């Protein structure tokens, strides 16, 4: 569960630098998890801006977070875990303890 006032910037910076291999699949899964279908449009818009890949990922994550505020950290952990980013999840839960609850299924 996401506490009020989550500082997403550093979280998204960390995620952006770690999911470069299959970032589009992760972004699609995040948007699908909150029933938003416009993720391909958002991905394409960021690619058209010729931004560095990590910035494209960051911008997509920001758009995702703006779509739904409640339980966003839980959804993020779930999708990262499903995409085998277990070490990243552990790092997020350690470095951002106040934003993430520790779930034994993700560690």
Image (cartoon, helix red, strand yellow):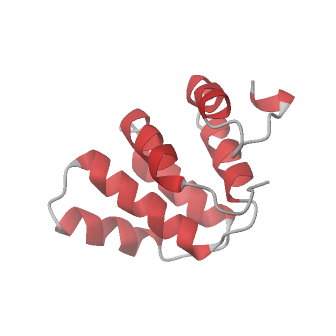
Q: Position of residue 7 (x, y in %)?
A: 55, 54
Residue 48 position (above or below residue 12)? below
Q: Quadrant of residue 58?
A: bottom left
- Closer to us: 76 or 12: 12
Residue 84 seen in this snapshot: no
Q: Quadrant for the N terminus, please.
A: bottom right
Left or right, 96 with reference to 28: right
Q: Residue furthest right?
A: 104
- Closer to us: 86 or 82: 86
Q: Residue at x 55, y 76 (%)?
A: 37
The mark total stands at 0
Q: Residue furthest left?
A: 50
Left or right, 76 with reference to 52: right
Residue 71 seen in this snapshot: yes
Q: Quadrant for the C terminus, please.
A: top right
Residue 73 position (above or below residue 98)? below
Q: Position of residue 48 (x, y in %)?
A: 18, 68
- Closer to us: 41 or 46: 46
Q: Residue at x 29, y 53 (%)?
A: 55
Q: Quadrant of residue 84?
A: top right
Left or right, 99 with reference to 44: right
Q: Quadrant of residue 16?
A: top left
Q: Residue at x 54, y 73 (%)?
A: 66
Q: Position of residue 22 (x, y in %)?
A: 42, 41
- Closer to us: 16 or 101: 101
Residue 68 position (above or below residue 107)? below
Q: Residue at x 56, y 29 (%)?
A: 88
Q: Position of residue 20 (x, y in %)?
A: 36, 38
């Amino acid at each position: 569960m996401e506490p009020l006032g989550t500082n997403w910037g550093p979280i998204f910076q960390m995620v952006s630098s770690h999911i470069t291999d299959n970032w589009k699949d992760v972004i699609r899964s995040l948007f699908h998890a909150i029933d938003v279908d416009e993720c391909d449009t958002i991905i394409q818009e960021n690619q058209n801006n010729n931004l560095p890949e990590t910035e494209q990922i960051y911008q997509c994550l920001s758009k995702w977070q703006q779509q739904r505020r409640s339980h966003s950290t839980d959804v993020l952990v779930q999708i990262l875990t499903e995409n085998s980013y277990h070490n990243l999840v552990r790092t997020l839960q350690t470095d951002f303890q106040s934003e993430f609850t520790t779930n034994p299924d993700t560690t």
